[in-house]
Amino acid sequence: MQIKDVSKTVGLPIPTIRYYESLGMIHPTKKGYYKTYTDDIVIELKQIKILKEAGLSLKCIQTIFFYNTADEKSLSNVILLNLKEMLSKTLEEQNRKEQRIISSKKILLGMLKKLDNALEHHK
């Protein structure tokens, strides 16, 4: 698949895809003049997009992708422990955000219910 097709499929601008490539987060293969993006790369780009939309920093995502492509045996315990700590903190923050969203949804639903009741009385 060419980059323009990947861009349409994933919903990311071409410069963004190239930027992720320059960071070493994705690895298309070069065939002739064009680079080829596999289905696996499309999946990785979708994952990056989801993680970015969820509020993770690009540095955090880059670290996650580095670990996913690295040979586990070549990573030291210090690196693995640091990665585990970073992911745990990120997950905790995501859980806090999720709870805030749940709370705000309850407030909004309550307000909508009051408005529905008020509108019903005005009929």
Image: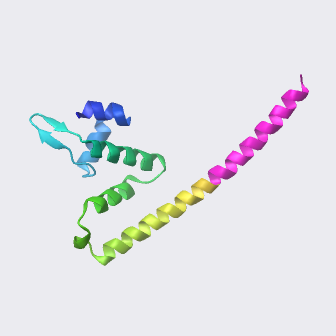
Q: Which residues are magenta?
A: 100-123
Is residue 12 at all visible to an observer of this figure? no
| Residue 4 picture quarter | top left
Q: Residue at x 34, y 45 (%)?
A: 43
What colouring does the structure picture have? Answer: rainbow
Above or below residue 68? Residue 35 is above
Pinpoint residue 112: horizontal percent, then vertical percent.
76, 37
Inspect the magenta stretch and tell me whether residue 109 lies in it.
yes
* Furthest residue in direction bottom, as rendered: 77
Q: Residue at x 68, y 48 (%)?
A: 104
Q: Residue at x 63, y 50 (%)?
A: 101
Whether residue 86 sits left or right of residue 74 in the image: it is: right
Q: Residue at x 13, y 41 (%)?
A: 30
Whether residue 71 sits left or right of residue 103 in the image: it is: left
Quadrant in the picture for the C terminus: top right
Is residue 43 at all visible to an observer of this figure? yes
| Residue 6 picture quarter | top left
| Residue 42 picture quarter | top left
Q: Main secondary structure of the magenta part?
A: helix
* Furthest residue in direction left, as rendered: 32
Pinpoint residue 119: horizontal percent, then vertical percent.
84, 28
* Furthest residue in direction front, as rendered: 39
* Furthest residue in direction top, as rendered: 123
Above or below residue 76? Residue 120 is above
Quadrant in the picture for the N terminus: top left
Counting labels gives: 0
Whether residue 27 sits left or right of residue 52 in the image: it is: left
